Amino acid sequence: MENNRSKLIWVALALVALLVAALVFSIFQVTSLKSEVDSTRAENEQLQLTNEQLQLSNEFEAINSRFAQYEDQATQLGGDTILAKYNAAKNKIEQLLDELNSEKKKSQQRITQLQNEIATLRGLLRHYIAQVDSLGKENAGLRAENAQIKDENMQLSSKVREVSKTNETLSERMTLAEKLNVTGVTLTPLRKNGKKEKNVTKAKQLMVTFTIPQNNSTPVGSKTIYMRITSPEGSLLGNAGSFSFEGASLPCTAKKTIEYAGEEIPGVTLYWDVNTALTPGDYTVELFADNYRLASRHFTLKK
């Protein structure tokens, strides 16, 4: 008997150890995935800033190339003043580009500073061209070169947009792994007794229902879901406060807080008590949480 009891104790201890190991491994996997997502997002941001710097650098070279072709005329048209202003702006940009090239981590503030300096240089070039045009010197040649530069800039912008779009797609895929999902969104008019009302003009409540599927990548915890219902006239129904979304404050029709543990939550419902005349037509239901738009659905309600 004593031997059997000892064996059972050892088996129980072994099972506990296995459970603890499995829990530690699961925590490690979640932490590793979060770290990979953060790292990828940071790399995407740096790639986008590098692309912006490349575009600005190419534009700077194009401006210099154009100005160099008519540098002799600049002296005739504006004396030393226009050359001094241009060279000062040019030196500032070259210094800024050198600093950016030496920085391992780019910042949006520095890229914006570069944009502003190149805008100043571009303005000086436009002023110079305007003087040339006013004197009627080589107008046709300048227009042709201007078109060529614009075409080259458009081609470069197109390439940058393609790269940016690829980066955005990658970023969206990574962030979607964390996004709370919803399925089966419905909008139902209700009578005073809670039963379905076919005539929207007689509805006393609007009920929105949906399901939150299982998603192991979504952080668990308390989630506040904000609902917006827009009438056929384009006005927001109700006023249950506001929430932050993409840097702006949006009013909502209703809101509800749930506890999400990574498992499916069926039959989530939000209600809005009708306090205005409703008309037949297309209604839009939007759901938001954690600074994401979870869903946007259109429903036609009839009289």
Image (spheres, rainbow, N blue to C red):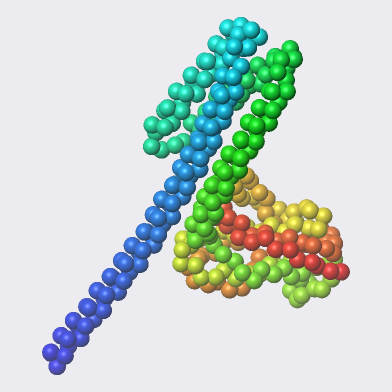
Say if 302 sits above or below 11 in the image.
above
The residue lying toward the viewer, choosing from 175 and 195, is 175
What residue appears at the point 69 percent right and 70 percent down from the top-left corner? 186
Please report the residue visible at 40 percent of the width from the left and 59 percent of the height from the top.
33
Q: Residue at left 46%, top 28%?
A: 97
With 211 as the anchor, is 88 left or right in this view?
left
Q: How many labels were placed on the picture?
A: 0
In the rendered view, would you say 15 is above or below 163?
below
- The image position of residue 158, as x and y in percent, is 61, 43
Is 250 on the left-hand or right-hand side of 93? right
Residue reaching furthest left? 3
- Is residue 90 placed above or below 112 in the rendered structure? above
Q: Is residue 45 above or below residue 110?
A: below
Identify the residue at the far right of this view. Answer: 303
Residue 130 in the image, given as x and y percentages of width and height: 70, 17
Decide if residue 24 is on the left or right side of residue 237: left
Taking depth in this image into account, of 157 and 203 the one nearest to the observer is: 157
For the view shown, which residue lies furthest in the bottom direction?
Answer: 1
Q: Quadrant of residue 199?
A: bottom right
Q: Quadrant of the C terminus?
A: bottom right
Question: Which x, y percent locates residue 149?
Answer: 63, 31
Quarter holding residue 274: bottom right
Q: Is residue 255 visible?
A: no
Query: Quadrant of the rendered structure where residue 6 is?
Result: bottom left
Q: Residue at x 71, y 53 (%)?
A: 239
